[in-house]
Image (cartoon, rainbow, N blue to C red):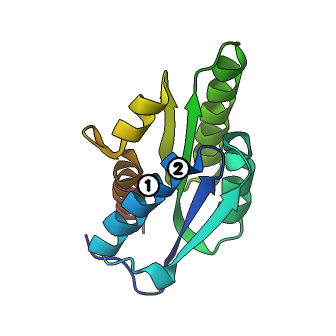
Amino acid sequence: MPAHREQRVVVVVSRFNEAVTRRLLDGALEALQEHEYPRDRVDVFWVPGAFELPVVVDRAVRSGRYEFAVALGAVIRGETTHFDFIATEITRGLGDVALHSGKAVGFGLLTCETMEQAVARAGGEAGNKGAEAALAALEASQTLSRIDDDQK
């Protein structure tokens, strides 16, 4: 899946649960590197929490500088309903960004019951969902480009 040399990618990462999100970021950067997106063509922006992911991803893709985006975060269930509201709104927000911008947005938001589950999905026995989100966004972006090329 070769990339156009001038195109850039944006990865937006939540600092909350950084022990997990940094591992997601490492997986995403490694996957992108393996698919001809070296680190110098990937801009990484950190945000305080997962709730800020949609607005920053939206601003980045609307800037016109990026071929696609990857959003990475980890929300772990607590003792209140906060988890449900946050997870739902982030998911809706990122979906809205993709639909309204026409850009692929890799969904790398872990929604886990425990920290152990999150660690397993951030490079542990369940793989690295950051890498998976980056590759999904790359493939979707390439599909969108093929659709656009077919219309010319």
Q: Quick check: marks 2 and 1 in contact, CB under 8 Å?
A: yes
Residue 82: x %, y % from top left? 72, 20
Q: Residue at x 40, y 40 (%)?
A: 119
Q: Is residue 151 visible?
A: no
Going by the numbered disc 1, the residue's amino acid type is: Arg
Q: Amino acid at mark 2?
A: Ala
Question: Label 2 vs label 1: CA separation?
Answer: 7 Å
> Quadrant of the rendered structure where residue 65 is?
bottom right
Query: Residue 91, how many percent across, how many down?
Result: 59, 33
Q: Residues within 10 Å of mark 1 (few under 14, many from 20)?
A: many
16 left or right, relative to 5: right
- Secondary structure beneath label 2: helix
Please state which of the two labelled residues, at mark 2 or mark 1, is closer to the viewer: 2
SS for callout 1: helix
Q: In the rendered view of the protein, which quadrant contains the C terminus?
A: bottom left
Give the mark count.
2
Q: Quick one: 19 or 57, which is closer to the camera?
A: 19
Q: Residue at x 67, y 38 (%)?
A: 93
Q: Residue at x 49, y 21 (%)?
A: 113
Residue 23 got which mark?
1
On the image, numbered disc 2 is attached to which residue? 19
Quadrant of image for the N terminus: bottom left
Residue 27 shows in this picture: yes
Horizontally, is 152 left or right of 60 in the view?
left
Depicted 1 relative to depicted 14: above or below: below
Q: Residue at x 49, y 44 (%)?
A: 107
